[in-house]
Amino acid sequence: MKKLMILWWTLIGVGLKGQPAGDSLYLSAADSAVNAEEDEFQHLVDGLFHEDQFAGIDTLFWDNAMINAGHFDSGNWKDTAIIVLVDSAAGRFFCPPFVNYLTCNFGWRRHLWHYGVDIKVNKGDTIRAAFDGVVRVTKYDRRGYGKVVVIRHRYGLETIYGHLSETLVLPTQQVKAGETIGLGGNTGRSTGSHLHFEIRYYGEPVDPNDLIDFRTFTLKNDTLVLTRANFEYLVELRKMKWMTVRKGDTLGHIALRYHTTVRKLCQLNHIRPTTIIRPGQKLRYQ
């Protein structure tokens, strides 16, 4: 499936940076220099994955800036992915990123979907890589993940570690399962020290509970089997429609704009007609 996805990505003429392939015919000298630097970086990244130790890691949706760099069409997916998570003969293992109780699980959290699990940590606690891989992103996301690390693993898997107080790795750095990648914290959009931990398959969030038994922090199986059923929840979520509150908006104004009612808005967002809404706030209207 991986080869078919890469072929599809090539056929539609979109590079890893999202630029149409034909644009290269009209590049300025400055653009050519930038592209040369990007090509050099891409060769470096590709070189990392050619080593036997990291066989199976590809560069689809590779981007050092975007936490969510792309995703495949899981809604129309008809394949089955069989992913070997642990292979002791090859020296590949699993390590829980941190061991403590969950403060929030995968799924609905109030009226929003929570795409990972939150593990209780204290500031400065050691956070470890769950599997062998290559660091794709380290950055500060002020409105969301805070200080975050994204690691690319074999066969399209990625893990995300959010709300860190410090990141201790760099993009393109190779890491082994159990290696320290950061320190626990409370950065970004967070109301208390915890580790936000996500697992994604080609950009689509997978329930970490499908892999890990969080009562014991052990893998449920050495092999992960993924089908469309693992992503059915996304089909329903993507039918929902959201808007951003503007300055001066009221629930009445929003209801008129989106051809709905104040009562419906309140039901969808678990609020009351008297709730104060603020500019920048996200509200679901369908």
Image (cartoon, rainbow, N blue to C red):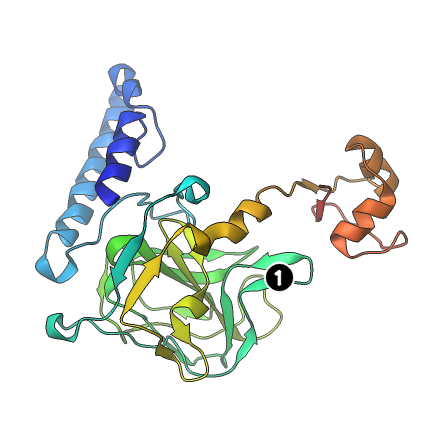
Residue at 62% over, 61% down: 108
Graded by Cα atoms within 10 Å as few (under 14), some (14 to 19) or many (20 or more), the crowding at tag 1 reads few
Residue at 23% over, 74% down: 93
The residue wearing badge 1 is 108
**Percent x, y of residue 206:** 43, 59
Image-based side of 92 in relation to 102, left or right: left
- Observer-nearest residue: 238 or 112? 238
Residue 275's place in the image compared with 224, above or below, is above
**Residue 14 in view here:** yes
- Observer-nearest residue: 227 or 137? 227
**Percent x, y of residue 94:** 28, 74
Q: Quadrant of residue 161?
A: bottom left
Image-based side of 8 in relation to 52, left or right: right
- Residue reaching furthest to the left: 52
**Percent x, y of residue 216:** 41, 84
- Observer-nearest residue: 162 or 215? 215
Residue at 51% over, 59% down: 115
Amino acid marked by disc 1: Trp
Residue 157's place in the image compared with 244, above or below, is below
**Residue 34 in view here:** no
Q: Quadrant of the N terminus?
A: top left
Residue 227's place in the image compared with 253, above or below, is below
Q: Quadrant of the C terminus?
A: top right
**Percent x, y of residue 157:** 32, 57
Q: Quadrant of residue 147?
A: bottom left
- Residue reaching furthest to the right: 274
Disc 1 secondary structure class: strand
